[in-house]
Image: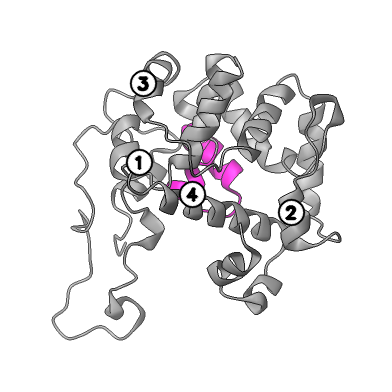
Amino acid sequence: MDRRKFLTFVGGASALATMNANQKADALEMAMEQELENANINHISKSPFCRAYGVDNNWESGPRIAGQLRHMGHEPRLPRMSAKPTLLEFFDKRIGHSSHLLQSARLAKLNGLPEKMILACLLHDISVTAYINVDHGYYGAQLVAPYVEEEISWAIKYHQSLRFIPDEDVDYPYPEAYIRYFGEDYKPEPYIFKDGEYARNHKWYMTARQICINDVYSFDPNIQVSLDDFHDIIARNWRDPEEGLGYDGSPSAHMWRTMIFPNNFL
């Protein structure tokens, strides 16, 4: 990705200077995903992603006009979700910028990884694409934890730290993009190194590391992937609740409801 495009994406050099190291890395990944999605716009169907909604509602940031009601319920600019949404429905109606996730899962599949690792790659940036960008590994893990094996959510959480930590034994160097965009003196926050060290000594280390390996090379605008290729893997490794995502009372149900109703005033 061209550095000038990246600076434009984040709002200029002055805006970049206000970000901490982890925010810069998240912004770069998001910018690369945006560029990839733009390149595939005619090939991969997607819905706009939730963080963009509401930006054209001038009253939201200004004084309320007399008689104007605050928004609650279904957001009319979005496809309406069913009464019992599934993961596939969220991919169809709420998870934008899915090209990178699909490419990552495709690469994991081509590399012969177990299905749980393929699913982890498919979901590793689900928070970036549909919920929140900052600390996306931690939020993403929390989002999916009730519906997958613990190893999958653990790997999603700790890939955020491990992406900064090279491992020559598995041919994972420090990403050149981070040096190119943030400089050689770029250092993540201390908690990233703390969690990365913990992860390196954990029994599921390689599951999280494989997300990083299959993440770095998954921004090719010439590759087209369909979610249909992973329906069987999702069916065997993901548990949709009978009540529907967002309505099952799980610890992350409120997060799924936030994606269903992203612009509710309260």
User: Does residue 138 sit above or below 181 in this rendering?
Assistant: above
Earlier residue among tags 3 and 4: 4
In the picture, measured across the screen, residue 262 lies left or right of residue 28, that is left
Whether the residues at callouts 2 and 4 have beta carbons within 8 Å, the answer is no
Under mark 3, the amino acid is His
Residue linked to disc 3: 231
Of badges 1 and 3, the one in the foreground is 1
Q: Position of residue 39 (x, y in %)?
A: 43, 50
Point out the tag, 2 or 1, that comes first from the N-terminus: 1
Closer to the chain start, of discs 2 and 4, is 4
**Residue shown at 36% from the left, 49% from the top:** 41
**In contact (CB < 8 Å): disc 1 and disc 3:** no
Q: Earlier in the sequence, mark 1 or mark 3?
A: 1
Of mark 3 and mark 2, the one earlier in the sequence is 2
Q: Main secondary structure of the magenta part?
A: helix
Residue position marked by numbered label 1 in the rendering: 44
Report the span colored magenta.
125-144
Q: Secondary structure at mark 3?
A: helix
Q: Which mark is residue 222?
A: none
Q: Secondary structure at mark 2?
A: helix
Amino acid type of disc 4? Answer: Leu
**Distance in Å between CA atoms under marks 2 and 1:** 28 Å
Q: CA distance from mark 2 to mark 4?
A: 18 Å
